Image (spheres, helix red, strand yellow):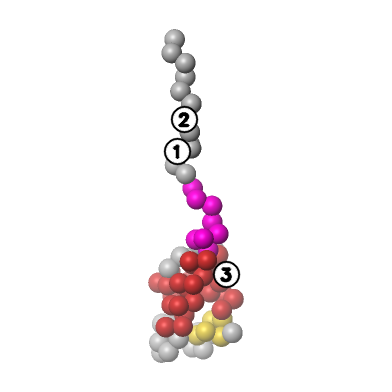
């Protein structure tokens, strides 16, 4: 489905950009040009990006900066 007629951006292109790490509407605009011409698609494109990033965040594993349990060395 075409989202932005002015720049010929479809839903698949937006989905691929989100999967590639462009995690905000503004990043998608910079990458694809969506909603930068007439602006008619801005609401739909913004909602789609929000939906896709929410789904992508729910599927990604949580990165941990520290181990779940630290094992202390025995006292010498």
Helix, strand or loop at label 2? It is loop
Q: Which residue is drawn at 50% across and 85% down?
A: 4
Residue 9 shows in the view = yes
Q: Residue at x 53, y 74 (%)?
A: 14
Pinpoint residue 53: horizontal percent, then vertical percent.
48, 67
Question: On the image, numbered disc 1 is attached to which residue?
Answer: 66
Q: In this view, does 60 lie above or below 32?
A: above
Badge 3: how crowded within 10 Å, few (<14), some, or many (20+)?
A: few
Magenta stretch containing residue 60, yes or no? yes
Nearest to N terminus: mark 2 or mark 3: 3
Which stretch appears magenta? 56-63
Question: On the image, numbered disc 2 is attached to which residue?
Answer: 70
Badge 2: how crowded within 10 Å, few (<14), some, or many (20+)?
A: few
- Asked if marks 3 and 1 touch (Cβ < 8 Å), the reply is no
**Figure quadrant of the C terminus:** top left
Q: In this view, does 9 lie above or below 30?
A: below
């Amino acid at each position: 489905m075409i989202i932005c007629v002015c720049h010929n951006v479809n839903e698949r292109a937006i989905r691929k950009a989100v999967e590639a790490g462009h995690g905000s509407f503004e990043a998608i605009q910079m990458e694809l040009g969506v909603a930068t011409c007439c602006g008619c698609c801005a609401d739909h494109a913004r909602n789609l990006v929000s939906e896709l990033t929410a789904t992508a965040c729910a599927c990604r594993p949580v990165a941990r900066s520290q181990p779940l349990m630290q094992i202390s060395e025995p006292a010498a």
